[in-house]
Image: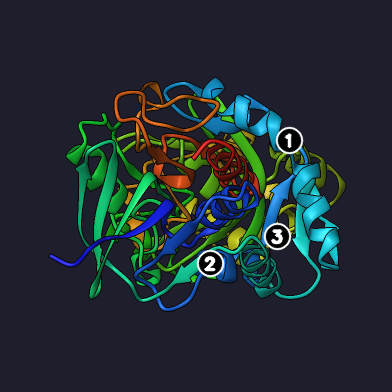
Amino acid sequence: MAKAEQFEVVVIGAGAAGMMCAIEAGKRGRRVLVLDHASAPGEKIRISGGGRCNFTNLEADRPDRFLSANPRFALSALRRYTPQDFIALVDKHGIAWREKTLGQLFCDGSAREIVTMLTTEMRQARVELHLSHPVSRLERVGEGFQLDVSSRTVACASLVIATGGKSIPKMGATGYAYDIARQFGVKLTETRPALVPLTFEVGLLDRLSSLSGVAVEARVASGRTAFEEAMLFTHRGLSGPAILQISSYWREGGEIVVDMAPRVDVFTGLKAARAANGRQGVATALAEHLPRRLADLLVEQHQLAGTLADISDKRLAGLAEAVNRWRVKPVGSEGYRTAEVTLGGIDTGELDQRTMQAKGVPGLYFVGEAVDVTGWLGGYNFQWAWASGWSAGQAA
């Protein structure tokens, strides 16, 4: 057997968390190797935020913005490496950015600038990056680890797993991190797609087919959790920020409650319109609050052809209920194919919250999306990647 090439730190995964970890370990003078089976680093960064990378959120230190069996687990990392810390790095590289709604920060230009920033920082920290290098064997040897990678064998004292979750397999996502956890006896929590569009059964899709492409501002609730953002009707069901957000809380078999005219009492509005002009068509009156295609379909489905003067309070109330409290039961989601993140993963009870090291396996670290920490839409998951990678990089 060929002699293993020695590194102090090996990071598997050249995504957001992995590159951040490698940078920090390299700055400490550690000899660091980053491996990835993909042909380019930071592919999820590149496609994020519509190609502009929503790289953090100004409110990312709030535990209520994260889902986990222990939402407070993430606070140690998030409070030690803050959005302001990452902004300072972005500014150092001269990358223009802007704040959009809800504390979300985006690049003015391309998300590729963030990838270039991270690869530049890795080079400056003397990190070795080897792409198109899948790991074929990984095992514990003494107090460290040994890996077979392509035609070489490497060894390290610290091994960082930063391969993400299962979301967007066409970008190369796999369950590799979970396989490594099982290999070393590290517990997992249930995983499922999150920040993902929801789908309807065929009959409902047929009834709503004319709405594909229609967007509305909506308040979407599942249980006690609700989000008020844009919602989009699709040929499979519903998408848009409000739906992606609620998908992390919705479970199969449950319903969602949608208010398609938040802060508008549609019943009161229709009665007022009838008093002002009873000859007005019902769809025309409803279109004051909704896109016309949606108004037309709702009026048709409630068989309310004619003028407002012809319609009783009871029937107007039924129409308003369909707008302000539409109860609908999705049959599923679009799955990992389009999910932005994976919910669940490495059990946080198995990890040291300051270092991200597995408590039962000295030298083994898990960071980023692979861990059971999932943020809201809007830069939270990137900040978790930066912060968890930074934390491991201080210790690995």
Q: Which residue is mark 2?
A: 42
Q: Which residue is mark 3?
A: 281
Q: Quadrant of residue 280?
A: bottom right
- Judged left or right of residue 256, residue 295 is right
Amino acid type, callout 2: Gly
Query: CA–CA distance between discs 2 and 1?
Result: 46 Å
Number of other residues with Cα within 10 Å of mark 1, as a class: few under 14, some 14 to 19, many 20 or more: some
User: x, y (%) of residue 5?
Assistant: 33, 62
Closer to the N terminus: mark 2 or mark 3? 2
Depth check, mark 2 against mark 1: the one in front is 2
Q: Secondary structure at mark 1?
A: loop
> Residue 168, which numbered label?
none
Task: Give the residue furthest to the front.
Answer: 3
Q: Residue at x 85, y 67 (%)?
A: 96
Query: CA–CA distance between discs 2 and 3?
Result: 53 Å
Q: Secondary structure at mark 3?
A: loop
Amino acid type, callout 3: Gly
Q: Quadrant of residue 216?
A: bottom right
Q: Are marks 2 and 1 in contact (CB under 8 Å)?
A: no
- Judged left or right of residue 106, residue 343 is left
Depth check, mark 3 against mark 1: the one in front is 1
Q: Is residue 262 above or below residue 36?
A: above
Count of numbered circles in the view: 3
> Residue 265, which numbered label?
1
Closer to the N terminus: mark 3 or mark 1? 1
User: x, y (%) of residue 249?
Assistant: 45, 34
Query: CA–CA distance between discs 3 and 1?
Result: 19 Å
